[in-house]
Structures are given as structure tokens and as C-alpha cells.
Amino acid sequence: MSSIKSTILGFPRMGSDRQLKKLVESFWAGKITETELVEGSKKLRAEHWALQTSYGLTEVPVGDFSYYDHVLDTAYSVGVVPERYQNLDKDGGIQAYFAMARGLQNKSIGVDVPSLEMKKWFDTNYHFMVPEISDDQQFSLHSTKVVDEFKEAKELGYNARPVVLGPVTLLTLSKAAKGSSSAPLSHLSKLIPVYVELLGQLAASGAEWVQVDEPILALDLDAAVYQPAFDRVYSEFAKISGLKYLLTSYFDRLGDNLAWAAALPVDGIHLDLVRGASDIDAALSTIPADKVISVGLINGRNIWKANLNKQLDTLNKVIAARASASAPVWVSSSCSLLHSPHSLKPETGHLDEETLGWLSFAEEKIEEVAILAAAAIDRSSVEAQLQSNAAKVLSRQQSERITRPAVQQRLASLNETFYSRQAPFTERQQVQRSALQLPLFPTTTIGSFPQTAEVRKARAQFRKGALSASEYQEFLDAETRKCIEWQDEIGLDVLVHGEFERTDMVEFFGENLEGFVFTKKGWVQSYGSRCVKPPVIFGDVSRPKAMTVDVARFAQSCSPNKPVKGMLTGPVTILQWSFVRDDQPRSQTAGQIALAIRDEVVDLEAAGIKVIQVDEPAIREGLPLRKSDYEAYLKWSVDVFRLATTGVRNETQIHSHFCYSDFNEIFTAIKGLDADVITIENSKSDLKLLGALEVHGYAAEIGPGLYDIHSPRVPSVEEMAARFAALQKYIPAENLWANPDCGLKTRGWPEVKESLTNLVAVAKDARKQH
Ligand code: GLN
Ligand code: ZN
């Protein structure tokens, strides 16, 4: 074999120093012009192509760049622009695009439109904008972004492969517009010609291969619906002369979709051999010999160095199996590198040498792809790199920093008593009632209070050393005391300390636990210009000392008459929002985190804390993509929550909180958590949650959110009272709590004060009426 194509499915957009974030945010703030935004982005793309080529990748993806989100880009390109945005673009600018992304409120021109809905991209922490398809939807070529970017790359001399999100995935991820009822996919035949027009332009511009992403192929699909839909699309695409298509899917196995996907009239099929490794044998026997197989061997979803020798074995197996095939094999990343941080370079000097040697971010992953491709042709050409890789991989396997035998033994030795409370809920409820003496419809909040500029400034000063530890602590204590006294004054019943000491609910615990490291610039796009910097769990997790007990004790001392909640993050959420070690099952890492949280829960109880909340907002997003994998996940995620929370006496009340209301798939699991009280997002869910409550039956106490905290809008008493009255039809009064949807961290004090005062009034009125 003389040549083997090496490429990746996509590159992170933000830039080495989050340049894109700065560009778009400056543009939104009116600090730079659209031209400056355009030029700055162009420069960024050129840098990213140069980087990929510098490591020897033979082809670069284009069109993977986005100002905000690639699903939005695609929808916008094919004219899926709901009417409310349409007249915003008279000047040919990008107003409508950004209005769809983030809403537009401009009193001077009388515009006030909300954004599209945002949803998680498969099981990642990346959010996409949900396109809205109306019953009379028309499509038209509205933007040629991908064509323009292809030309841009070509002019710079790159061998470029345009990436487009496929029409079947686009429609499957869309929703019917308000007032429309037709299934988005039913509009497919009208959409195909617009894609054909776009692809035609790509062909005319000299593109040869086009990567069409159809990640819904990793989901359970009804073949009777989807096979004909895919057939239709790709038969039409095949008629465009001069173009070849690489059909990609990722994040899970193709599984039973493989049989018909392999037969589609495309020219190549990409396999995610990291998450879909089980596809390999079936793929090798079903993918016809005239189709390229793109093997995704470098994990785009994690930050560990690949075991190159192992991946090379897989690659060689594929190459050997295709020896007589007419089409070649390509080497690639498992999915787009969008979900990896940009580069390890800034971590030198920040992380220790050993840890650095274990990691690989997007830049290093490019190099890994290139090494694999080179090794497949001539192993000796990269022998040194392979050996160095093997040494690093071995160093991680053997490092004493990874293993803590005591933690492993403790987890292995647990018996059933560690997974259940002493008495069932109904008994606990009685004891808790007499211990806590709460009124009917108790009021509470979810935990955080505004992280004001002052709070952030004090933290920054403390980090710089401008504030001493004791000065910073004094500041935090004063904030906490003010916050608690205010909650007491307005009549809330179960108080919180406000979480002023935490930047982030996962980072805080990661910083206090062993087994975690933090990167300096390991940013990953979460949505739009927002990036997160997930901690890295590299080893066995343990708790060197209590993490929240002092704060909780102090907070409770500020409130002689009312309980203050101890506030913890649950094991599944800590796991889900971190980069997790890949050398043991996730469930085991979660179990170790659960033990640490359990010890904290027990310590909080011993310190006199009567109500303890363990937040699990990420339990839903951890749900696997394939239904046949649900059960195993739900079993261990419920187990680890119980492990974390069941070490307490019956009178200690355990709360949990979830930031979504789409509970149908996981309702049994939510019940299985056996929490005494749950608070859930509800205000935007059109009673979806209540329907689920009714269908599945929920017997414990519950606080469906009375207002949306994502907006600065203050909800009136009447509005929340109406919502509260509706809740009472579904939930027995003695089990119902009154609270907002989520934490108040991102809000300002003026609106928080008004909103919560109104909320307390709603509960008080309801008590009188009851
Ligand atoms: N206790 C956290 C807070 O109030 C919960 C945040 C969340 O659910 N995402 O901020
Ligand atoms: Zn929440």
C-alpha cells in the first residue's frame, strides 16, 4: 500500500486561547465590526488547517468551523429560518443567525425575539440549537458557508474535505415549530434538492470528497422509516457528478443499522472504533470492497494518550481484511475533535511531567492519527514515536499515583446495607416531620445565590495573593451570613449558604478530592461562546478531609431557627462533567466518588446538619445512546447515588436536584434514588413532568420549579400561584415544595429578591387556602 489517507472528522473551533470566544463576544458587544469578526475567524481557520497539515495529515476537514453551532449553521444554510427572525437580515448581515442562536432584544428597533431551543448533542456536553420545522416549511439555499470555506482552504493550497451535517440527521434533530404538527422528517423530499444544490456548488468549486455526518446512525432507528429515507437521500446525492461521499456516524456502534447503511450508495463509511469497536467484524464483512473504510481510532471524546500499538493492531487488521478491496482504508479520529481541548502545549509547567505524558488534546491527537497512518505504511519510519508512546502508556498503567488500594478494597467490600436507608420513605417522612417542623408547602432554593462581581473579585484577589486566606474567609463568611439572614427575613423555610466559595459545582469537589488534576487551558465548547474546563480524573478518588463541613456548620450557626441545607454534588454529575479515566469502568470511578461523598454526608450529619442536598443534574445526560444499554447504566447510577446518601439516620432529610423535566425514560431510576425530596426544573416543560408523575407515580416529596432562573424576568405572584395550583392537582399537598427551577448563581440580587419574595407569598397564600 503506497498511501493511506490520514485525517480527522473535525477540529475544535475556539482556538488555542479561545480567540473565537473573544471575537464573537466582542462582536456582540459592538466592540468589533462584522468585517473584523469575519477576518479574525478566517485567520483562525487558516491556523487550524496549517496545524493539521504540519503533523502530516493528508486532508483537512472544512466547514467544521462555526460562529456558534454547526446544527444551526446547517439549518440556516438550507433556509430553516423561522419567520420571527426573517426580517432581521435586511442588511445581509448575520443578525438573524445570531438571533436564532441567542435571541435579540433591541428596544430601539422594537425587536424582542427569543432564541431557538438548545439541546445536548447526543451524550456530549456540547449543546446544539434545535431547528424548527413548520407544517408549510420551504427550504432554499440561504448561505453557502461550507462552499466559501472550501474555496478559502483551496486558495491556501489545502487538500480540503467539506463537512456537512446530513439531511436525515438534521431533520431528526429538529422539532415541529409551535402550532405545527408534522414530523420534521416528513419534509425530507423538499429538503433534498437544496442539499443537491449546495453539493453541486461544492463539486463546481473542485471538491472531491464530502463528509456527510449522520450521527443518528448511532441511535436505535426504525429501519422501516430510516432505510428508505437514507436511500432516497444518498441515491439523489450519488447523481451529482464528480463528488464522493464519506458517510460518518460516531459516539456509539452502528449496530443493527450497519447492515443497510453499508449498502447505501456512498463511497466510504466511517467507523467509530473507540465507542463502536464492536462493529468491526460485521463492518469488515458487510462494507463492499469498493467503499473506503475510514477507521476512527483516536478518541475525540477523551484526553488520554491513545495506546498506539494497540490501535495499530486494529488498523492492520482492517488493512489486511481489505487487502483485495479496490478502495483504500483511511485513518481518522473517532469523531470530531470538537470535544477535546485545543492543545497540551500551555499545560507544560502547569501539570507535572508524568501527567503531561499521559494526555493528548486535539493537537496531539492529530499527531497520533499521523503516526498511525505512517506506521501502517512503514512501521520503521515512526518506530521512535511508537516506543515513546508505549513508554507513556506503560507509565500510566504502572504509576503508583493511580492506585489507592485502600479505596479499591473499600469499594469491593461493601454489602447491601450501604445501598439503603434504615427505614422506608414513609417512615422516614414521619420522623423528619417531627424533627424539622416545616410548614405545609415548604419553601427553599436550589443552592447558589448570585455570584456578584464582588464575589468574583474577592476570589481573584485571593488567588493572586492580594487577599490572605483569612481575609478571604472573612469575606465569604460575611456574604454567607448576609445571604442567610435575608432568606430568613423574607420567610424561606429551608435555607442555603449560597455557594459563594464555589466557582463551579464539580470543580469545587474535584479540587478537594484526590485523584483529580486541573488543566490550565483545557477548554471545551459547551454552547456558543461558552466553554467549560472539565477536571481530569486520573486515579482512584478519595477524600483527604472534610470538604464542606466548616462552611455548613458556620452557615447553620447563622440561622438558629431554620435548617440550612448541606450542599453536595452527586457522583454521576462529578463523573459526567469531568474527563474520566479509561482504565476502569465508569461505574467503578463513580463508586469511588460516591464513597467520598458518603463520608461527607455522614460528617455533615454529625456536625448537626439536618437537611443535605446531593445534586445530580447530569444523571439524564449520562444515559447511553442505545436503549439496550440503559438498564446497566441506570442500575449503577442509582446505586452510586444511594451509596453516597444512605449513610444517615432516618431523621436526616436527603434532597436531590435535577435540571430537566424530561423524565420518562428515567423515572424508575429517579424513584430508585430513594431521596426524601427532589427539586426539578419544570417551569418551561408544559406539564410534561406532571404527566410523567401521574403515569409513573411518585410517592416522595417534590418541588417542581415555579419559575425559570435562566432569564432575569421576575415572575409575578399570580403567575407562580397559577402554576402552583396546577401542581396541587397532581401532587398531594403534604408532599409539595415551592422553589425555583435551579440555582441562582447567574442572576442579579435585585431580581432574585423580588422573585423569591413573590415565591414565598405564593406558598403562604396556598397554606391559607388549604
Ligand atoms: N446547587 C447548585 C446550584 O444551585 C445546583 C446547580 C445545578 O443544578 N446545575 O447552583
Ligand atoms: Zn439545576
Image (tube, rainbow, N blue to C red):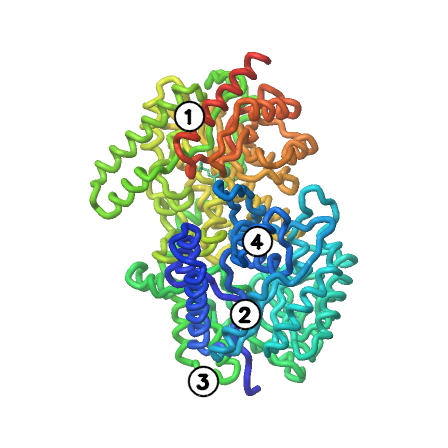
Which residue is labeled 3 in the image? 380
Q: Earlier in the sequence, mark 1 or mark 3?
A: 3
Which marked residue is nearer to the observer: mark 2 or mark 1? 2
Mark 3 is on which residue type? Ser
Instruction: Indicate yes or no: mark 1 CB to ligand 1 under 8 Å.
Output: no
- Residue 350, quarter of the rendered image: bottom left
**Quarter occupied by the C terminus:** top right
Mark 4: few, some, or many residues within 10 Å (few <14, many ≥20)?
A: some
Looking at the image, is mark 1 or mark 4 earlier in the sequence?
4
Of circles 1 and 3, the one toward us is: 1
Q: Report whether the residue tagged 2 is closer than 8 Å to ligand 1.
A: no
Question: Mark 1 and 3 residues: CB-CB less than 8 Å, in contact?
Answer: no
- Badge 1: few (under 14), some or many (20 or more) residues near its Cα, within 10 Å? many
Of the image marks 2 and 3, the number of the one nearer the N terminus:
2
Residue linked to disc 1: 495
The amino acid on which the numbered mark 4 sits, given as a three-letter code, is Trp
**Residues at badges 2 and 1 in contact (C-beta under 8 Å)?**
no
Q: Is residue 662 visible?
A: yes
Q: Looking at the picture, tell me which residue is in the foreground, 52 or 90.
A: 90
Relative horizontal placement of residue 533, taking residue 476 as reference (left or right) = right
534 w.r.t. 275: above or below: above
